[in-house]
């Protein structure tokens, strides 16, 4: 069991900033709700969710082998994987196409299905 007062104190001492804007979060702020474990499993090909539910947060966590190792016991299939991000709100043209790249590919007549499969 846990002490409710300790839990309350931990919540109150946590930072108030809830958005990481695609940046890697601090390890001390990483919490894996059981409801998110399903989305982190390898058989989750597409994760759908509204704005602010954690999709970008988990993308930045999955990029980091050190952060992934903190929840190996919850999602053991992620251990020792090389994870590459196909698209993110954090632009990195060396790793994945940005909005302009998608527009160029579509204007050149590339089938959106082919783009999806490539990423």
Image: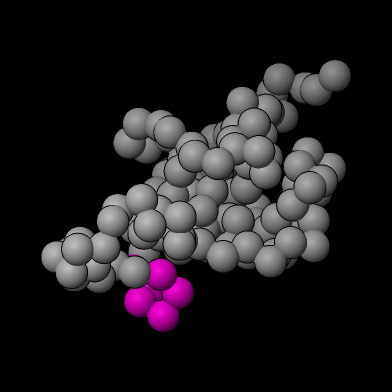
Please give the range of residues in magenta. Answer: 91-96
With 89 as the anchor, is 105 left or right in this view? Answer: left
Give the percent coordinates (x, y) of residue 104. Answer: 18, 70
With 50 as the anchor, is 79 left or right in this view? Answer: right
Residue at 36% in and 59% down = 115
Give the percent coordinates (x, y) of residue 1. Answer: 85, 19
Give the percent coordinates (x, y) of residue 18. Answer: 42, 44
**Residue 100 appears in view:** no
Residue at 49% in and 37% down = 47
Question: Is residue 44 placed above or below 99 in the rendered structure?
Answer: above
Residue at the extreme left: 107
**Residue 1 appears in view:** yes
Q: Which is the main secondary structure of the residues drawn in magenta?
A: loop
| Residue 107 placement: quadrant | bottom left
With 46 as the anchor, is 8 left or right in this view? Answer: right
Question: Is residue 98 placed above or below 26 in the rendered structure?
Answer: below
């Amino acid at each position: 069991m846990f002490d409710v007062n300790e839990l309350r104190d931990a919540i109150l001492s946590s930072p108030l900033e809830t958005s990481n804007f695609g940046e890697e979060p601090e390890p001390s702020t990483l919490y894996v709700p059981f409801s998110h474990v399903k989305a982190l499993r390898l058989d989750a090909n597409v994760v759908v969710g509204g704005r602010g539910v954690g999709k970008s947060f988990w993308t930045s966590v999955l990029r980091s082998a050190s952060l992934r190792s903190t929840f190996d016991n919850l999602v053991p299939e992620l251990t020792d994987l090389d994870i590459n991000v196909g698209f993110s709100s954090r632009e990195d043209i060396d790793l994945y196409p940005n909005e302009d790249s998608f527009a160029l590919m579509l204007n050149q007549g590339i089938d959106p299905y082919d783009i999806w499969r490539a990423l």
